[in-house]
Amino acid sequence: MRKRPRRRRPKRSGANGAGQRRQKLSRRVRELYRPDLADDPEAAEWHAELEGELARPGRGRGRQKTRSGERASDEAGVLDERDDEQATGSESTGRVIAISSGSCRVQCGEEALDCVLPSDLARNQRAVLAVGDRVAFATHGASHRLRRVLPRRTVLSRPDPRNPRDERVIAANIDIAVHVESVAQPPLRPALVDRYLIAIARGGADAAVCVNKMDLLSGTEERLRELAKLAPYRALGLSILPCSAKTGEGLDDLHKLLAKRTAVFVGHSGVGKSSILNALAPGLDADTGAVTRRSGTGRHTTTRSSLYRLEDGIRVIDTPGIREFGLWQLTEDELAAYFADFEEHAARCRFRDCAHTHEPDCGVRAAVEAGELSAARHEAYLRIRASLASGD
Ligand code: GDP
Ligand code: ZN
């Protein structure tokens, strides 16, 4: 029998058409990703398309083209109307925008209210409450008291660094997680993308990749060469946005992608996450605490996340203390389910529980050898699998 993932399956942005979409995307991977991209007519076409996009003024790759994002953002649109609204009766609801010891700040309509946590919640607050959570609270006179955390739509979580068996939710109810990379200083590392994609998919949010510091590259050729490294991910349906926090390139596209959605930026230190956030919202709402990050005592004055409201219904959860995260409770057997591009090739494996590592007649490895599947994707799979086995 083929082994089935036992715990959580990857969540999808919608129930309909996901299988079909995957199939289509797997086909695109096969079509697009050859070991030698330069000789591939399809890849050349994609390059041309990309070049066109880069050259087009305004580069309007808006929401309508964010393949994976459509459904989630539509849902979010509906929820958004309720999210920050005050409810009738003795209870109100709102969204957590910041957390401190024993209390949290809740956005309720246009007001930001400080809510005291009941003692049972306060004792365990790191485990049960996250920025982005929708909560119900009661008001007595001038004070507000949190009652319940409402069910989450999505999460971005990681294992607790001190106790890896515990889940730590970094951000809740996010529509999209933007993985930020840079093309230089530090150089583009496509190998990091896979891990982030899995963590994001597990929590149910959409993903996009923002390629920052494009200003450090000279000329179209160099730009295309860098961006071509992300071809397998684009073929998976991911939005890839070249941008520069410095020159403003691509920020319109990012703005459009994020409109009416709640987002979180993830990625290694130094790639420009804060710079992008500041460039998107130069007058970032000071009373939410944004300025503490850039204050004289240094960047990491707080490890607490905050939710910022930008124009056009954009909400961004900033997670200053968290630059990297592991994969919470993912088993080796579950891993392949997150590599949608392996699916059709895995059907040809001799063993139904093939791990695609060393087994004879492995359809996935055969596809890599035949140039039908990205070798980089398979290497990423092997690398992550090894790290899961070693308990990393
Ligand atoms: P974070 O750690 O991901 O939040 O990165 P920061 O926003 O702190 O940026 C790290 C460094 O990269 C800073 O020195 C920024 O000035 C620089 N930086 C950020 N974005 C860009 C960009 O688009 N182009 C260039 N050339 N430098 C940038
Ligand atoms: Zn196999």
Image (tube, helix red, strand yellow):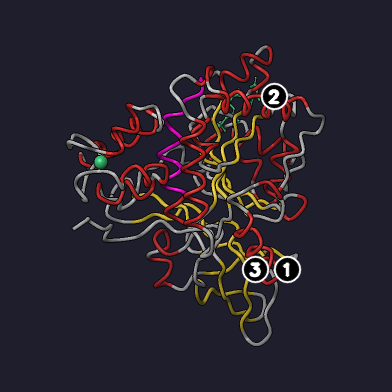
Q: Which residues are magenta?
A: 186-200
Residue, x 21% and y 41% (percent of image)? 389
- Disc 3 designates what residue? 79
* Disc 3 from disc 2: Cα separation: 37 Å
Residue type (three-letter) at the residue carrying disc 3: Leu
Residue type (three-letter) at the residue carrying disc 1: Gly
Give x and y (percent) for residue 255: 72, 43
**Element under disc 2:** helix
Few, some or many residues within 10 Å of mark 3 (<14, 14–19, 20+): few
Give x and y (percent) for residue 264: 57, 47
Figure quadrant of the C terminus: top left
Residue, x 62% and y 31% (percent of image)? 296
352 to the left or right of 84? left
- Disc 1 designates what residue? 109
Residue extending farthest to the top is 218
Residue 315 in view (yes/no): yes
**Element under disc 3:** helix
User: In terms of depth relative to the viewer, which is nearer, 255 or 122?
Assistant: 255
Question: Which of marks 2 and 3 precedes in the sequence?
Answer: 2
247 to the left or right of 160? right
* Disc 1 from disc 3: Cα separation: 13 Å
Camera-side mark, 1 or 3:
3
